[in-house]
């Protein structure tokens, strides 16, 4: 299997971003996703900065993918999206159907991001015809569902036309909203948020009334409170998943990546840490663990 670093979901200072991707260039990741996918107000790195970073990282013999926004709210954001889809060099991770259409028009191959609601064979067949070369599975799909979908496509001779990638570590992006929850948590309006999410490099925790870590607030994005962790499930991915995705963390991302690779080479099973879960993979409640 291959390993990827997904697009960073959080808002970090430019220096921290530069340090992270300097380490990524020498890491064991095969694929690196770049770009802002959550909020266009996060401008520590602008579009030209992401493109320059992509060109630098391309020299590290890794596949570089440019990730697009999941929720577009202004014409300026659409204009930036068009420039990404017409960059002429790097493949696109489309997190919005508008990005898929721009890629189709430009005959650019694309990755179907996990923000796209593609759950079955007919949907994937349509995306393949539009230029999809990789499917990042929606976060709530379990192994059996994925296997059945891929078996259906194999019967049509379509399975070899695309790769399958699944997020295997990190808080899961569950929903997006026009509201900014991080700003609201600080009694700020979205228009005057003062980019306060930069103060939360791992998002802001929202507990339930029973003091359970229920969600992580990340700007307009709501994420799972638990960290999704499939480190015990690598064996069951063999022959099914082509690419294991690690979502960038504020700390220890590359140690986590190396741990996954070690477990693929020599499978071991350990009790998941507190606030880690793997329920979705086993088609049970997402916050539960097997």
Image (cartoon, rainbow, N blue to C red):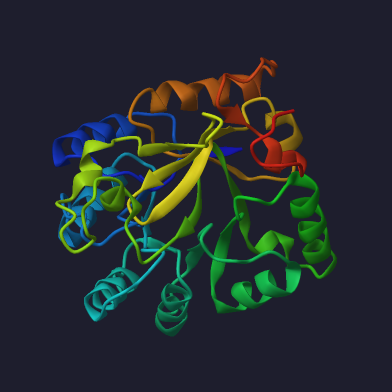
Q: Is residue 144 visible?
A: yes
Which of the two residues, 112 or 217, is positioned nearer the viewer here?
Answer: 217
Vertical position of residue 45 compared to residue 162: above or below: above
Vertical position of residue 194 compared to residue 68: above or below: above
Which of the two residues, 61 or 127, is positioned nearer the viewer here?
Answer: 127
Image point 77% across, 60% down: which residue? Answer: 149
**Image label count:** 0
Q: Quadrant of residue 74?
A: bottom left
Image point 65% across, 78% down: which residue? Answer: 126
| Image location (x, y in percent) of residue 242 | 63, 45
> Where is the N terminus found, in terms of image quarters?
top right
Which of the two residues, 56 or 130, is positioned nearer the viewer here?
Answer: 130
Image point 39% across, 67% down: which residue? Answer: 71
| Image location (x, y in percent) of residue 20 | 27, 33
| Image location (x, y in percent) of residue 240 | 73, 45
Q: Residue furthest right?
A: 155
- Whether residue 91 sits left or right of residue 188 in the image: it is right
Q: Is residue 238 visible?
A: no
């Amino acid at each position: 299997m291959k390993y990827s670093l997904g697009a960073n979901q959080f808002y970090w200072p430019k220096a921290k971003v530069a340090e992270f991707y300097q380490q990524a260039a020498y890491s064991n990741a095969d694929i690196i996703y770049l770009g802002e996918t959550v909020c266009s107000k996060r401008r520590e790195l602008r579009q030209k900065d992401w493109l320059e970073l992509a060109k630098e990282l391309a020299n590290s013999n890794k596949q570089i993918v440019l990730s697009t926004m999941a929720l577009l709210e202004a014409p300026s954001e659409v204009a930036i999206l068009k420039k990404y889809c017409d960059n002429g060099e790097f493949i696109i991770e489309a997190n919005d159907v508008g990005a898929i259409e721009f890629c189709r028009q430009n005959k650019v191959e694309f990755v179907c991001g996990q923000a796209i609601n593609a759950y079955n064979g007919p949907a994937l067949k349509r995306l393949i015809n539009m230029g999809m070369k990789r499917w990042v599975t929606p976060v709530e799909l379990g192994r059996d569902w994925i296997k059945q979908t891929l078996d259906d496509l194999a019967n049509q001779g379509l399975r070899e036309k695309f790769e399958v990638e699944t997020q295997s570590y990190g808080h899961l992006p569950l929903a997006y909203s026009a509201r900014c929850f991080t700003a609201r948590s600080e009694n700020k309006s979205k228009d005057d948020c003062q980019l306060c999410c930069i103060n939360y490099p791992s998002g802001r925790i929202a507990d339930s009334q029973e003091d359970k870590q229920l969600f992580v607030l990340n700007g307009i994005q709501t994420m799972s409170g638990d960290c999704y962790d499939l480190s015990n499930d690598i064996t069951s991915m063999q022959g099914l998943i082509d690419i294991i995705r690690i979502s960038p963390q504020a700390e220890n991302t590359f140690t986590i990546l190396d741990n996954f690779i070690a477990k693929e080479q020599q499978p071991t099973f350990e009790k998941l840490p507190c606030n880690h879960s793997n329920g979705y993979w086993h088609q049970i409640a997402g916050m539960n663990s097997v």
